[in-house]
Structure formats: C-alpha cells, structure tokens
Amino acid sequence: MLHGVNSFFFSIFLIYRTKSPLQETNLTFYSMMAISTFSLIFSLSIAAVIIFNIAGNFLVCVVIMKKKAMKTSINWLLFHLAIADLLVAVFFIPPTILSHFVEQPSGVTGDLLCKFVFSGSLGWVAALMSSFLLVVIAFERYNATLHPLEQLSRSRSRWLVPIMWILALLLVSPLILVSNYDVENEMCLNNFPNQVTSRAFFLFWSFCNELMPITIMGYLYTRIILRLRAVANVPVSYPNRSVSQSRHKVTKMLISISAIFIVCWTPAAVLCILTPLIPGGRGTVYSVAKASALLNSSLNPVVYSFHSQQFRKNLVSMDACCKSN
C-alpha cells in the first residue's frame, strides 16, 4: 500500500515538473516577443540617429554647394566629410535595420548581399574615409596656422579625395572578401582562415581608423593651440585682426570636431585591443564600433551650426528662400 502511494505522488511530481506542449509553446512565444521588442527598440533608436545623420549632413552639402562664400578649400574638405558621414548612415541601414526584418537568400546571391549590403562593409569604408579626411583637415589647419604659405589648395584636394577613397576601400577589402552568408545561422559571418588572421585584421583596421588619426590630430591641434596662445597678445592691424579671428573660429570648430571623434572612437579602439577579455568578444566590439561611427558622423553638423555663424546665416537664408518660393 505504501509503495502504491509513493508511486502515485511520484507520478504527480513528474507531471508537475514536465512542461506540456502548450507551456513550451507559450515560453517560445514570450521569448520571441522579448527578442522582437528589443530588436524593435534598437532599430528605432538607430533609425532616429540615421535620419538625423542624413538630414544634417545633406544640409551641410547643400549649403556649401549653393553659397559661393562657402566654397573655400577648407569647406571643400568639409563637404567631402559630410558626404562620407552621410554614406556611413546610408550603408549601415541594411545591417542595423533591414536585417531584422528581411530574410536573406542563400547561395551566391546571399554571399554577394553579405559582401556589399548586409555586412556593413561599405559603411566601414565610409567611416575610414571620414577619419582620413579629419586628418587631412588637421594638416590643413596646421599649415594655415603655422605655415600660411603652404595651405592645401582646392585643386590638390580634388585628386587627394579619390585617392583616400581608394585607400579606404583597399583597407576594408579583406572584410568584404571573407563576408559570406551562413545558412545554418541564417546571418552574415566573416569567415577568416583562423582566429589569428581575424584579430590581426581588426587590430590593423582599428589602428588605421582610430589610433593613428587620434595620435596625429592630437599632435597637430596641440601645436596649433600653443601657436594661437603665443600670438594671442600680439597687436595687429584691424584687417589682419579680422582675418585672424576668422581663422581662429574655424580652427576652434575643427578642434571640436576632432575632439568629438576622439571621444566617440576611443572606447571602440580600447575594446578592440581588449577583445579577448570582453564579454561577447568580437560581437560586442562590433556593436560599439558601429554605434561610434553613427554617433560621430551625426554630431558634425551640430558642431557646424554651433560654431559657424556663416553656416547658420546661409542655412537661414536658404530656409527663407524655400518659404518664399
């Protein structure tokens, strides 16, 4: 009798501990809902940054192209910087937003879409180009401040910009080559030959995109600031004072842009070096770097509006013309 009672309660215990098909279905449903909710919130946040990026950098391009007073050598470089920043947002739309809602095909088509669309490789090309342009702008300001006769002309920047685009594409080309569609995981993966090759590539890319530009800009702008402080108390005539003040304002604006770049990209650079010690590894570093690229490229138009009175005036005049029409 006692054995029968024990068997009865043991059977009830097993029924209680075992999940029914309905319970498993509900758990799966709630898990999917949680993942979908997180993906939706993340996608909406990224979408807001991307929209702000595209709108701001598009306005910068229009103002520089429409107004003759804005067509200087430094503004020509800022025009290309705005294009690169705008392309960062455009090329990161597929991997950050569309990938959550679009089912990719497999085979050759899936591999090609991964290489050029859903992996975000072209977005990294644009981010690298943005870094190169900031370094060139720093050299331009350095020459304008310390060696006024050696400023970069617009004609020279016309051939320099395509070369930098080609160099950025070549540096990111290994990532494009190894990016393929993984049928089992149903996502784009970077199939490097081994872990050593993968780590070597990302460290090299981080050096070119983050560590080297930060070091160069830090040195050049430090020299510029020291020079500006040295000549601040030197008396000059009124026309020269006006030109000097204008150059100082432009330099302060560009220093702010470089400072934002350093603040945005330093965490990604540190995490890239410490990848083996970071929870989530390469995935965490990739997400931080992507957020850094989008945030940095979105803030530059804000800096222009805050620092450049000429940019604000031209923007207001364009708005007035649009309303009158």
Image (cartoon, rainbow, N blue to C red):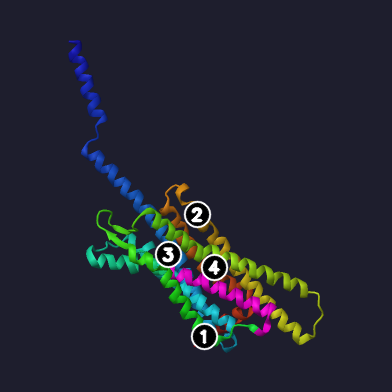
- Residue 65: give its label: 1
Secondary element at image label 1: helix
Q: Which residues are magenta?
A: 124-149
Sequence-first tag of 4 and 2: 2
Cβ–Cβ below 8 Å for labels 4 and 3?
A: no
Q: Tell which of 45 and 249 is nearer to you.
A: 249
Magenta stretch encompasses residue 35:
no
Marks 4 and 1, how far apart at CA: 20 Å
Sequence-first tag of 4 and 1: 1
Secondary element at image label 2: helix
Depth-wise, is mark 3 or mark 1 nearer the camera?
Answer: 1
Q: Which residue is under mark 4?
A: 299
Binning the other alpha carbons within 10 Å of mark 3 as few (below 14), some (14 to 19) or many (20 upward) gives some
Marks 3 and 1, how far apart at CA: 27 Å
Q: Which residue is under mark 3?
A: 47
Secondary element at image label 4: helix
Q: Amino acid at mark 4?
A: Leu
